[in-house]
Image (cartoon, helix red, strand yellow):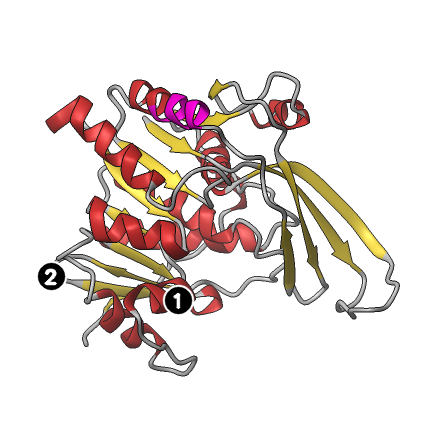
Amino acid sequence: MIVTVTANPALDRTILLEAPLHPGEVQAAASEREGAGGKGLNVARVLVAADAPTLAVLPLAEDDPLRSALSPSRVPLRTIGIAGHWRTNIATTDPAGITTKLNLRGPVLSDDEAAALVDEVVAAVDGARWLVLAGSLPPGVGPDFYVMIIRAVRTRWGSGAPRIAVDASGPALAHVVAEGHPDLIKPNDDELAELADTALGDGDDLAREALAAARRLVPAQVATALVTLGGRGAVLVSADRAWVAVPPPIRVRSTVGAGDSSLAGYLLAESSGAGPEACLASAIRHGAAAASLPGTQAPSPRDLPLGDISVAPLIP
């Protein structure tokens, strides 16, 4: 089983535009989609679509509108009650697939609510293979909140603790890498550059530059890094090897949730016993499928692009 944690969920509203976004002007929208979001929930929805055992843990009030938005997803939930209601995130996507996101702040979690969430996660991961800590942190908790969860889980379950995957950014990710020694991180190229305190270009050497940056972290602080590079694919870096893969040609409709789907694809393959190359190929396939769908729609196996994904060793 794979357990996901979404500490700062949201109601995601994606507006599909008829033309490129022009700030300051009135524009017509072609359509809109609305659904429950947050990186951990996005991962869980892909896992459920693939019939993989999963459980999503999140803070959620009984009367929060997000609860009804979650119903169609069929994602099994464990929730802890909170006083506030969750935020709405707005994204616009133009015909070329260029996405602009406006993410609002969520409600403030009290100390008791934060402690209850940690306890709920510790209980939920009993027997799980992976624990996924994904997304931003809500107001009210410190940037080391994910580290607190990791320590609580490993203290309770010892050698039976699940592997830890983290998809976060900024101080939250920095604290995890410095103090949590996760089994997997999934930054994009910008997040990796910030984490490794380096600059990455956008030329043909991006994959090798990403490898060099990831080597500052792997394996000393992180066991494995899956670095997504947008339309240029992804790099997988383990303790002694690295690989690069590129996505198949697709029509990009929305990049919202594509990185989350990539992580889900990796975990699906790894949980089935696949090797690193196959895990990277699965990550690429699921990320490409998500980018070809409107809004934050989770790709199912029937949405995955056909054909082989080219995975090659990456040499510094």
Q: Which mark is residue 189?
A: 1
Instruction: Name the foreground residue: 39 vs 297.
Output: 39
What secondary structure is marked by label 1? helix
**Quadrant for the C terminus in the image:** bottom left
Work out which quarter of the rendered image holds the N terminus and state it.
top left
Q: Nearer the viewer, residue 49 or 189?
A: 189
Q: Earlier in the sequence, mark 2 or mark 1?
A: 1
**Residue under the image location 22 percent in, 53 percent down:** 178
> Which of 114 and 166 lies nearest the eye of the viewer?
114
Q: Amino acid at mark 2?
A: Asp
Determine whether, in the image, residue 251 is placed left or right of residue 27.
left
Residue at coordinates 29% horizontally, 35% vertically from top-left? 148
Please state the horizontal and vertical placement of residue 295, each as a whole percent of the image: 65, 48
Q: Quadrant of residue 236?
A: bottom left
Q: Is residue 252 above or below residue 163?
A: below
In this figure, which residue is indicated by the disc labeled 2?
Answer: 240
**Mark 1 residue type:** Asp
- When the figure is inspected, residue 164 is found, relative to residue 174, above or below; the finding is above
The label on residue 106 is none
Which secondary structure class fits the magenta region best?
helix
| Badge 2: residue crowd in 10 Å (few <14, some 14–19, many ≥20) | few
Residue 100 in picture, x, y percent from top left: 65, 61
In the image, residue 222 sits, relative to residue 60, either above or below, namely below
- Residue 221 appears in the figure: yes
Residue 30 in percent (x, y) is at: 82, 54
145 is within the stretch colored magenta: no
Q: Is residue 138 left or right of residue 193?
A: right
| Residue 33 placement, left or right of 24 | left
The span shown in magenta is: 111-118
